Amino acid sequence: MVIPYRAEPHPLTGVTSGKLGIWIFLASEIMLFGSLFSSYVLLRVGTAAEYWPRGIEAGLNVPIGTMNTLILITSSVTMVMSWASLKMDKFDAFKRYLLATIVLGVVFLVVKAFEYGAKFDHHIYPAVGWPEATDPSIFYGLYFTLTGLHALHIFLGVLVNLWLLVYGAELWKTERVRYEGRIEISGLYWHFVDLVWIFLFPVLYLL
Amino acid sequence: MSEAHAEMGFLRKYVFSTDHKIIGIQYGITALVFLFFGFCLMMMMRWQLAYPGEPIPLIGGLLGETRTDRGAMLPNFYNQLGAMHGTIMVFMGIVPLAVGAFGNYFVPLQIGAPDMAFPRLNMASYQAFVIGGVIMLVSFFLPGGAASSGWTSYAPLAVIATTGQTFWLFGMMFLIASSLLGGINFIVTIIHLRAEGLTFFRLPFFVWSQLVTAFLLVLAFPALQAASVMQLMDRLAGTSFFMPSGLVVGGEQIAAVGGGSPLLWQHLFWFLAHPEVYVLILPGMGIVAEVIAVNTRKPLWGYRPMVYSLLFLGFLSFGVWAHHMYMTGMGTTMSTFFQITTMIISIPSVIILTCLVISLWGASIRFPVPMLFALAFLPMFGIGGLTGLPLGLAAPDAFLHDTYYVIGHFHYVVAPGTIFALFAGIYHWWPKITGRQMNEALGKIHFWFSFLFMNGIFMPMMFEGMAGVSRRLFDPTIYVTGEAAHGLTIMTSWSAWGLALAQVPFIINFFWSMRKQEMAEDNPWQATTLEWATPTPPPHGNFPETVVAYSGPYEYSVPGAERDFSPQFIKQEA
């Protein structure tokens, strides 16, 4: 039994089934993060302005956050380079770029872990209000929940890329087009997760 | 292809299968078991409501001291039953049966596809569903019992509830993940794997309903996923997304950061749960349309308006959620907006229902069991829909909101509505799944008694509600309204137990007809859609030869044709 449109694009949509699937998945991810951003807006609007800190006031480290932003943007570039290398039949270059993407993703997570650690050292936890007044805002709760969920997405992306690099590459020898498709799909997901951070960073650190 | 799969072991073939038909059957059986379980929870509640404080007969002594006092139900257990009845019926019964079972089995067949677009993803979605279901069931055995804050899990009540609520949230996350994976699979399958010649406007209405349902699953469920994450954080990490400052419960201030909004939970929940209502009803409408077209022997009246209405319903279902929240004091501007959208969304539902009714006009109707259920769906869903109009307007809603009227209303939509449609689907497609017909006589007994008792349950609720009986009371007789309407409560309870007895012929039929009934032909109903082009039961890979669609889905009684049905898969002589 052969299921069509795994490797070849469908004439109506112009994409393979996998690519259509990932776009629909990303649409649902937009609804997931959209719900969380909407909650952020609703909670912030419902709190008196003097009780809602800017990220710097609440002790978020803007230079570190900026660095992490640059790391993720770079990883998006290496991700697309790896896919392009594969398309141009340069398998070694592809492997190097994909490895670079994975390493950058891990670096992002490590930096994030140090940021969390610094917060915990200052006794800042999700359950802490800001400021510690009678009517505190739940800035830290949002910070930990949003960045935590985003970090989980990064982690899963790293796992998928690692699998594609180590075990999945077998497919390249037998069904090249499908393997290219998988890298492209993984790349779309990776770019999306970067994009979420591009929104998260200013919303939490700067605004 | 069949040779390659011949040596698959039992586990690989029936438990970890990637064949959409096996997965459909897995979904179907699991969902029917959950439906029955959820029904049993409700029957226990009906005892408490009819005979408050009296020991539950037969099983009262078996439930344990945390749930009962000398056989009589304790209030906390009643709350658990209420919350879990709703959760199980909606998320573990009807959606898996309507989408997971019927969608999985018949969408690929009706579009002439060999399988779903992502067979392994399909298996994963079933497994996520089972894991979610098991977590929900296990929660009954926790200290403090299962979730008891209603199926809506409103904050702050749910945030301060016992561990059962945490399990509810984890279980819900798996159920949502399952629906999400399934939804993606359905959309890609329907867009990409249609047979040659099967254009969008040649799709059976059932496939259209599954397509719109899949979009609702993919786009609405993440809101509850996000909300569940936040409620989990509230419960486990001590945040207070849904906890206001200075909340006092039982005379003591709750130790929470505060600054959160209980209304936020309601917005996120209903942003999922209103589209969810259409997830519950649209596949049912799809099944009924199929059954009516086959048994009236004429094309559906107004197929295109029905499809357009379906798309409009799906689109607008994202803009009506706060009509569940008129009582929260969210303000008249918001209420006005949501009243307007709610009145607008009733129009496409009425168009679909009207088209189905007009389809009967002038037909020489056959009355096999599936058609009886389909015909009963029309007035039952009609009652459910029309009784929703007063609830969609803020002023009458103020009187009716917390009464049994609401319960009667939405159960008319879902129980004699969707569940009758699902029964119609089971009887209609049984010969395709098992290769045998179901017994007609047992089916008719099942139908008539179910029809009688369904109305015996939900019609009294309408009157009780209008008489002012609150829907959340453990013992309705403590208020004069409930005392006065107590006769109706008892009637409802006996009808519920009668409904359980009415399912006995179905259960007998289910097992008996699987082995003993005569074999069915490949196309026993003389239908036109593609699922009847396969051998019965369909082999792995579905269609032995590539199938091509030559015409629309409902070419019945075509003038000049030899027979009164002209299947899509057979080229007609010009």
Image (cartoon, coloured by chain):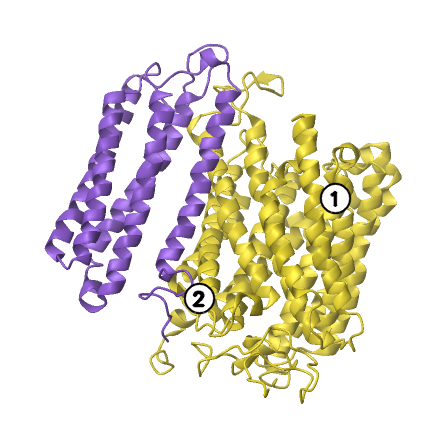
Chain colours: A purple, B yellow
Q: Quadrant of the N terminus of chain A?
A: bottom left
Amino acid type, callout 2: Met
Q: Position of residue B212 (x, y in %)?
A: 56, 56
Q: Residues within 10 Å of mark 2 (few under 14, many from 20)?
A: many
Q: Chain of mark 1?
A: B
In which image quadrant can residue A100 be found?
A: top left
| Label number found at residue B48 | 1
Frontmost residue, B423 versus A193: A193
Q: Secondary structure at mark 2?
A: loop
Residue B323 percent coordinates (x, y):
67, 37
Is B560 situated above or below B438? below
Q: Residue furthest front?
A: B574
Residue B254 in sight from this viewpoint:
yes
The image's mark for residue A35 is none
What residue is shown at x 59% (from left), y 51% (from top)? B314
Residue B507 visible to the viewer: no
What residue is shown at x 83% (from left), y 32% (from top)? Answer: B479
Residue B207 is left or right of residue B60, and the answer is left
Q: Secondary structure at mark 1?
A: helix
Q: Are marks 1 and 2 on the same chain?
A: yes
Residue under pointer 2? B116
Q: Position of residue B531 (x, y in %)?
A: 55, 75
Q: Residue furthest left?
A: A92
Image location of residue A137, percent across then percent down? 46, 18
Residue in the image at 83% along x and 42% along y: B464
Q: Quadrant of residue B429?
A: bottom right
Which amino acid type is shown beneath numbered disc 1? Gln
Sequence-wise, the earlier of marks 1 and 2 is: 1
